[in-house]
């Protein structure tokens, strides 16, 4: 059985996607707006801050626009501003995921806040300080009747961690929602039990895209017998009577994971969003990218897969990426790339 994503990949336009010279770009979720143009919501932080833990204190969500789904996308605006630190997302808004239902745009994301001093560019950030902010990740939601805003931002998290003793008692992060025609919404999220524990995925359900959400299972989904197998960065959608998910194969200790290539895409389906079946050929995309000028490169990372749909069918795959010799070894640039699907 052919993989429905991998066998549709076309060459990626070298001049496509979204990049900014003075910023690291991460994430990337696209939608066709009410104006017929294509709008990409992405995360960015200043390059002079470095690629390390500074993003936890300084990231913002921006909107870029293009007349074509593959881009290139041009920066339009910062979607959110910083706000008082009493709010859960005061300092950092990250991982945007845009959806549309019944006349309203729903922008899911996660944010952090922090009580101490914000580190300056070049400042050494201790692991303890970074972990404190990292553990404050909470999923948020903003809504608007227009892709141009204004956005009404929730003042409290859309989904909180559970009490200690549960696997998801530390954070809620990496939201991806599937909104059914009647508004019933399923959302995948990421969490873990304690600092440096393996990150896992859970599933919640609500009668409306804005909640309230209830967990469908006490246990995480995608539990593997091999402890070195691990997936993250889920992208969830619903079509043809099934739930579908794309994820990053984030295996550990050279175990080979589900695809045999670290950082590649994994595809799975489910009837209830709880019990998942890996595709017989789960490899959905690979870090070896063929470009429209005939060249092929091995990208050091492909992160945060997102799809653009037209008439209910996926037409473009968006991925955060960067050039470098090895995973996370970025040579000073990251951007959001686009792969058209045939």
Image: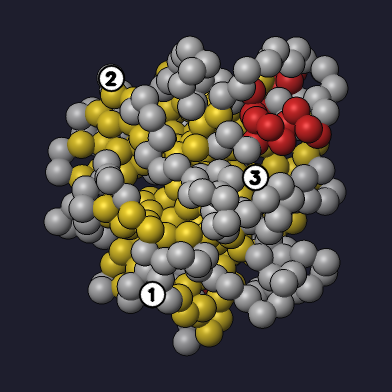
Q: Is residue 335 above or below residue 288?
A: above
In the rendering, which numbered label is found on residue 114?
none
Number of numbered discs present?
3
Disc 2 element: loop
| Residue that label 3 marks | 321
Q: Position of residue 104 (x, y in %)?
A: 20, 36
Q: Distance of mark 2 from mark 1, alpha carbons? A: 36 Å
Q: Nearer the viewer, mark 3 or mark 1?
A: 1
Q: Is residue 118 left or right of residue 100?
A: right
Q: Residue at x 58, y 73 (%)?
A: 223
Circle number at residue 150: 2
Left or right: 215, with 161 as reference point? left
Q: Would you call the spot at circle 3 few (<14 residues within 10 Å), some (14-19), or many (20 or more)? A: many
User: Which of 48/158 is in front?
Assistant: 158
Give the mark nearer the N terminus: 2 vs 1.
2
Say which element carries label 1. Answer: strand
Quarter of image, res 297: bottom right
Which mark is first along the chain, 1 or 3? Answer: 1
Question: Is disc 2 in contact with disc 3, using a CB cutoff of under 8 Å?
Answer: no
Observer-nearest of 204 and 310:
204
| Residue at horizontal 29 percent and vertical 24 percent from the top | 152
The residue where tag 1 is placed is: 270
Q: Which residue is rendered at x = 57% and y = 50% of the image?
A: 164
Determine the CA span between mark 3 and mark 1: 28 Å
Q: CA distance from mark 2 to mark 3?
A: 29 Å
Q: Residue at x 42, y 76 (%)?
A: 275
Q: Mark 2 against mark 1, which lies toward the viewer?
A: 1
**Mark 2 crowd level (few <14, some 14–19, many ≥20, 10 Å Cα):** few
């Amino acid at each position: 059985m052919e993989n429905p994503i991998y066998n549709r990949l076309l060459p990626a336009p070298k001049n496509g996607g979204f990049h900014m010279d003075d910023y690291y770009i991460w994430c990337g979720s696209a939608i066709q707006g009410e104006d017929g143009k294509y709008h990409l919501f992405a995360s960015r932080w200043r390059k002079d801050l470095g690629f390390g833990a500074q993003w936890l204190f300084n990231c913002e969500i921006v909107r870029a626009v293009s007349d074509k789904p593959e881009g290139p996308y041009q920066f339009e605006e910062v979607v959110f501003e910083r706000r008082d630190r009493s709010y859960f997302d005061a300092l950092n808004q990250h991982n945007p995921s845009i959806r549309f239902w019944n006349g309203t745009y729903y922008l899911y994301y996660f944010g952090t806040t922090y009580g101490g001093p914000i580190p300056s560019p070049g400042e050494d950030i201790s692991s303890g300080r970074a972990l404190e902010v990292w553990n404050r990740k909470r999923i948020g939601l903003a809504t608007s009747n227009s892709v141009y805003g204004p956005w009404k931002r929730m003042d409290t998290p859309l989904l909180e961690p559970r009490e200690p003793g549960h696997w998801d008692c530390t954070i809620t992060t990496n939201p991806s929602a599937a909104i059914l025609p009647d508004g019933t919404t399923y959302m995948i999220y990421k969490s873990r039990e304690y600092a440096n524990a393996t990150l896992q995925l859970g599933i919640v359900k609500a009668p409306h895209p804005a909640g309230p959400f209830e967990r469908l299972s006490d246990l995480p989904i995608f539990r593997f017998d091999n402890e070195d197998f691990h997936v993250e960065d889920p992208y969830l959608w619903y079509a043809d009577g099934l739930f579908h998910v794309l994820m990053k194969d984030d295996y550990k200790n050279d175990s080979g994971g589900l695809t045999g290539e670290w950082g590649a895409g994994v595809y799975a389906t489910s009837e209830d969003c709880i019990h998942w079946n890996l595709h017989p050929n789960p490899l959905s995309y690979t870090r070896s990218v063929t470009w429209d000028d005939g060249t092929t490169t091995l990208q050091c990372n492909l992160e945060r897969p997102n799809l653009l749909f037209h008439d209910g069918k996926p037409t473009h795959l968006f991925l955060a990426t960067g050039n470098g010799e090895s995973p996370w070894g970025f040579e000073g640039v990251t951007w959001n790339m686009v792969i058209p699907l045939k």
